[in-house]
Image (cartoon, rainbow, N blue to C red):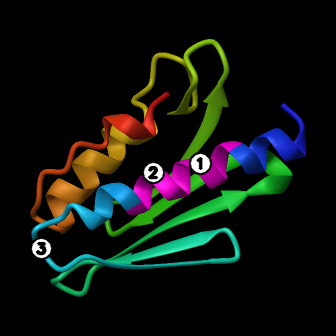
Amino acid sequence: MNEAQYHALLDDLMVTMEEILDTAETDLDFVTSGGLMTITCESGVQLIVSRQAPLSQLWLASPAGGMRFVYHEESNTWREDNAQAESFGQVMGQILAQFAEETLDCSDLDG
C-alpha cells in the first residue's frame, strides 16, 4: 500500500468512526485533528486513535493499553499483529463498552 492509499483508508475509517460515535446515547465527545481522534467519554476517560504514517499503522490508546493495527488487504481490515488477531472494529467495540459503558456496533470499521 502506498502513502496515498493509506491516508485514504484512514480518512474513510475516521468518517465512519464519527458516524458511529454520533449514534451514542451517552455523551461521547470527539475531536479530529491532524490525523488524531480524541474521544472523551462521559466519565472523562479519553481514547486516542492515531495514524502512524511512517509505519503504515493505526494506533489506539486507552486506559487498557496501547494497540497497533496493520491493514490486511486480503480481508480489508485493520488487525492487531496478524490476520487471525481481532480487528479494529472488534477492539473498538470492546473498548467503548468498557470505558464509555455503551454498546455500539463498530462492525462498519471492518471492511
Out of 86 and 34, give the one closest to the viewer.
Answer: 34
Dot placed on the residue nearer the N-terminal end, 1 or 3: 1
Residues at marks 2 and 1 touching, judged by CB atoms closer than 8 Å: yes
User: Which residue occupies 33% across, 69% down?
Assistant: 63
Q: Which residue is mark 1?
A: 12
In the rendered structure, which amino acid carries the disc numbered 3?
A: Thr
Vertical order, 6 against 81 (above or below):
below
Instruction: Please determine whether, in this image, residue 48 is positioned above or below residue 14.
Output: below
Number of other residues with Cα within 10 Å of mark 3, as a class: few under 14, some 14 to 19, many 20 or more: some
The magenta segment: 9-18
Q: Which residue is mark 3?
A: 26
User: Is 10 part of what is drawn in magenta?
Assistant: yes
User: Does residue 9 appear to the left or right of 62 in the view shown?
Assistant: right
Give yes or no for contact between labels 1 and 3 (Cβ–Cβ under 8 Å).
no
> Dot 2: few (<14), some (14–19), or many (≥20) neighbours within 10 Å?
some
- Quadrant of the snapshot with the N terminus: top right
Majority secondary structure of the magenta segment?
Answer: helix
Secondary element at image label 2: helix
Res 75 → quadrant: top right
Please indicate whether residue 54 sits to the left or right of residue 42 in the image: right
**Could you say where residue 53 lies in the image, as x and y percent from the top left?**
80, 55
Asked whether, in this view, residue 61 is left or right of residue 57, the answer is left
Where disc 3 sits, the SS reads loop
Mark 1 secondary-structure assignment = helix
Instruction: Report x, y in % for residue 99.
Output: 19, 66
Vertical placement of residue 49 versus 71, above or below = below
Q: Please tell me the numbered disc located at residue 16.
A: 2
